[in-house]
Amino acid sequence: MSEQPTIQLPEDKPLELAGRVYQSRLLVGTGKYRDLMETGHAIEASGAEIVTVAVRRTNLGQNPDEPNLLDVISPDTYTILPNTAGCFTAKDAVRTCKLARELLDGHDLVKLEVLGEEKTLYPNMTETLVAAEELIKDGFKVMVYCSDDPLLAKRLEDMGCIAIMPLGAPIGSGLGIQNRYNIRLIVENANVPVLVDAGVGTASDATIAMELGCDGVLMNTAIAQARDPIKMARAMRLGVEAGREAYLAGRMPKKLYASASSPIDGTFF
Amino acid sequence: MQVQVNGDGLELPTEATIADLIEHMALTGKRLAVEVNEDIVPRSQHPDFRLSEGDRVEVVHAIGGG
């Protein structure tokens, strides 16, 4: 058997977060799936290495034999990223992070999100700043969900957040990246990884995020609520990879008018 | 004695520990975290930490989320 020639792809540095290196730039959530089996299969198909979870009260009287999410998404296999979803105040977000750290045996990587209102789930940035400061002081590695304001993004970075995660569109909306210009500005100014968190609806949205130079994309609903979540998980993986490679390759300049691809000389008519 | 567990009132024997509460909830050995009156009680202290009348206890675990 002759050896296949390998195509040389542009060099890329893998994503690094809190001193750990990741090959995948797709981060996925674990909410809204039909069951834990579908969750596990979709996450495997996505190729994600970082997986978000929520922290909630155990139900009194629940079936003790019911499998636990962390039995399926094992912390031995995945980097578990607990979120503060559902928190509307800095205080609740900090409490949630402390519980998560205890839950995960001292693991201090968290996704901070402090929400402002139910309708848009838009981040409350003043509370986010307060919570970020307290968490960083307490030794947490904070990946922060935020608005796509370049100045606030920079401020969060300067405070010590290890990743900036602006929304592309409201959580669960699937509207795609609504303000590419702002995401681009945030990426341009940042010295820490920038990940679009929320708003992705389909694979091309993930590709656009990556083409803008983002270091990664975090999503949940776009996979979990697809007709076939496992197929969509794979599509997202490919979309993220395509976008990253296109970013590294450097796109052609846009022109207003045509430029023939076939030579004009040598025609026989 | 009466304590609040995840927002609901619960009658426990006097001097019950967190480990006793977890056993009562049939959650022994499960991966969870406990907060009493908004302070974390590390897992290593569960067998010795005695609850008091009126304590507000939260027992949480990881579930699906994005």
Image: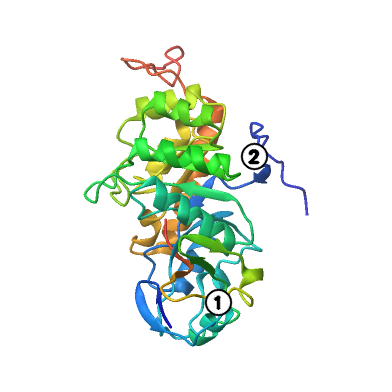
What colouring method underlies this structural image?
Answer: rainbow
Residue depicted at x 58% and y 80%: B19
Residue depicted at x 36% and y 32%: A148
Quadrant assignment, res A80 = bottom right
Disc 2 with disc 1 on a shared chain = no
Pick whichever, A39 or A154, lies toward us. A154
Q: Which residue is mark 2?
A: A14
Local crowd at mark 2 within 10 Å, few (<14), some, or many (≥20)? Answer: few
Residue A158 placement, left or right of A11 = left
Pick whichever, A70 or B26, lies toward us. B26
Badge 2 vs badge 1, beta-carbon distance below 8 Å: no
Q: Secondary structure at mark 2?
A: loop
Q: CA distance from mark 2 to mark 1?
A: 43 Å
Dot 2: chain letter: A
Dot 1: chain letter: B
- Of the 4 image quadrants, the one containing the N terminus of chain A is bottom right
Q: Looking at the rendered structure, which numbered label has been put on residue B18?
A: 1
Residue A246 placement, left or right of A223 = right
Nearer the observer: mark 2 or 1; the answer is 1
Q: Secondary structure at mark 1?
A: helix
Judge whether A235 appears above or below A245 on screen: below
Pick whichever, A60 or A28, lies toward us. A60
Q: Most extreme residue toward the top, as rendered?
A: A265
Pick whichever, A138 or A83, lies toward us. A138
- Of the 4 image quadrants, the one containing the C terminus of chain A is top left
Labels in figure, total: 2
Amino acid at dot 1: Ile
How far across and down, in percent of the image, does residue A186 sit? 44, 26
How far across and down, in percent of the image, does residue A58 sit? 44, 74
Residue A157 placement, left or right of A118 = right
Amino acid at dot 2: Pro
